[in-house]
Amino acid sequence: QFAGLFRDISAFLPDGRSDSVFGWGFNLAGLFKVIGKDAFVYQGAYGNGIARYINDTSGLGIDAAVISKQDPRLEAVPAIATYGGYQHFWSPKLRSSAVFGFLQSENTAAQVSSAFHRSEYGAVNLIWSPIASLSFGSEFLYGWRVNKDNSTGNAPRIQLSAKYNFMQMKSSK
C-alpha cells in the first residue's frame, strides 16, 4: 500500500506573527507471506511536516518549527520512520510477533534542547485465540528515546490484553 500526504501547516511565531509552510509525506506498507500463515510486515514513512501522523511523535507538536532565532520563519520538520515485524504461528490458536521500529526527526536550531530527535523500539508477544472471536495476549516492549541535546531515556513495558470481536466477517472461501 502506498499513500501520499500534502498539507498546509500554520503556527504563531515567537514575535506574534503567523506563518505557514507546505508539508508533504509518503508512506509504504506491506506484508509478505513467508511459510504457511507466517508473514513479514513492514512500513516506512518519509516527509516534511508529518510528525502528527507517526505514532511516537503524534501530539508532540513538532510538525513544524522556527528555523532559528536569526531566521524566524516556519520550517516543516523532516522525519523518517520505519518498522518491520515477523508474525509466526506456533499452532492455529497460538501466534507470536517480533517487531522493531525506528523514527528520526531532524531538529531545527530554534527547537528546545529537550525536543524529540529519535526513537527505537523492539517488541515480542504471544497471543492465544481459544476461539475465533476471543484473544488473550502478553507483550514485552522496550523503547529508547534521544532528544535534540542527546539526553536519552528508555521504557521497558509489559502489557497484557484481552480482545473479543462482537462481529465477525464471514469468509467467502
Image: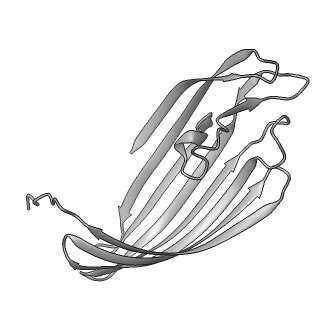
The mark tally for this picture is 0
Q: Position of residue 26 (x, y in %)?
A: 52, 38
- Identify which residue, 79 or 133, lies in the foreground: 133
- Identify which residue, 78 or 160, lies in the foreground: 160
Q: Residue at x 65, y 43 (%)?
A: 79
Is the residue 158 above or below the residue 167 in the image?
below
In this rendering, would 61 be left or right of 34? right
Q: Position of residue 105 (x, y in %)?
A: 70, 45
- Identify which residue, 38 or 115, lies in the foreground: 115
- Visible in this render: residue 15? yes
Q: Position of residue 153 (x, y in %)?
A: 75, 65
Q: Position of residue 60 (x, y in %)?
A: 64, 44
Residue found at the very far right of the displayed protein: 70
Q: Residue at x 42, y 41 (%)?
A: 2
In this rendering, would 132 be left or right of 158? left
In this rendering, would 109 be left or right of 170? right
**Figure quadrant of residue 111:** top right
Q: Residue at x 49, y 31 (%)?
A: 5
In the rendered image, the quadrant that contains the N terminus is top left
Q: Residue at x 83, y 59 (%)?
A: 151
In the rendered image, the quadrant that contains the C terminus is bottom left
